Amino acid sequence: MFLLNNIHDKNYKKCYPTESDVIFDISEKQLGSAKNAAWNELKEGSIVCVVTSTRRVSTFCKVTAIKSVEEIDSDGGEMFALFGVVIAKLMPESNMGLLLSKFSVKHQYLPSNKFSIGFHVADLGTALDPLKVKTRSGPKTISELKG
């Protein structure tokens, strides 16, 4: 399971009006940072949660595609978009720091369970697998969603 950092509330619908289901993007420059190496582990079917400025964990998506998009970042580099569909909600939503502490998540780029500067993609592995979420077919764990 992956945690994605959108704490600056980038509006993907506005940025990519001709694309549907964009849930996150990252620039070529950001991918050049070792902090974001987990991006290379994402694939179709991965479970992700995009964290916004509220720092709350609430919506879980399944990745449907990852591709280069026509948008160019401010440095003139390529942009890559993550496409996905909502598959579950955490009810009630939870503060990211408290939730990660509850599940004893340890990640080098999440000091005190907060995003470090320049960090956008966290592979949490199986740490949140026991977390129960609400789906259209009833309650499930993150592990069951991965299945």
Image: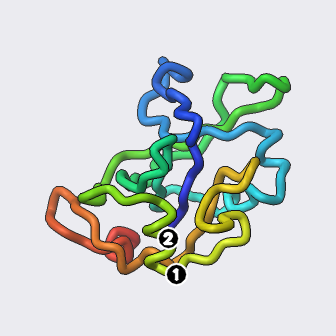
What residue would you read off at disc 1?
104
Question: Callout 1, which amino acid?
Answer: Ser
> In the depicted view, which residue is nearer to us: 10 or 138?
10
Q: Is residue 113 left or right of residue 78?
A: left
Q: Secondary structure at mark 1?
A: loop
| Residue 84 drawn at (x, y percent) | 43, 45
- Residue lying at 71% horizontally and 64% vertically, measured from the top left: 109
Question: Is residue 16 visible to the viewer in this orientation of the structure?
Answer: yes
Residue 139 is labelled as none
Vertical comparison of 112 with 15: above or below: below
Q: CA distance from mark 2 to mark 1?
A: 6 Å
Residue at 77% in and 58% down: 35
Disc 2 is placed on an element classified as helix
Q: Residue at x 48, y 40 (%)?
A: 23
Mark 2 Cα-neighbour bin, 10 Å: few <14, some 14–19, many ≥20: many
Which residue type carries mark 2? Leu
User: Foreground: 38 or 109?
Assistant: 109
141 displayed left or right of 97: left
> Residue under circle 2?
100
Quadrant assignment for the C terminus:
bottom left
Is residue 67 rendered to the left or right of residue 55?
right
> What is the number of callouts on the image?
2
Residue 6 at what x, y percent from top left? 56, 42
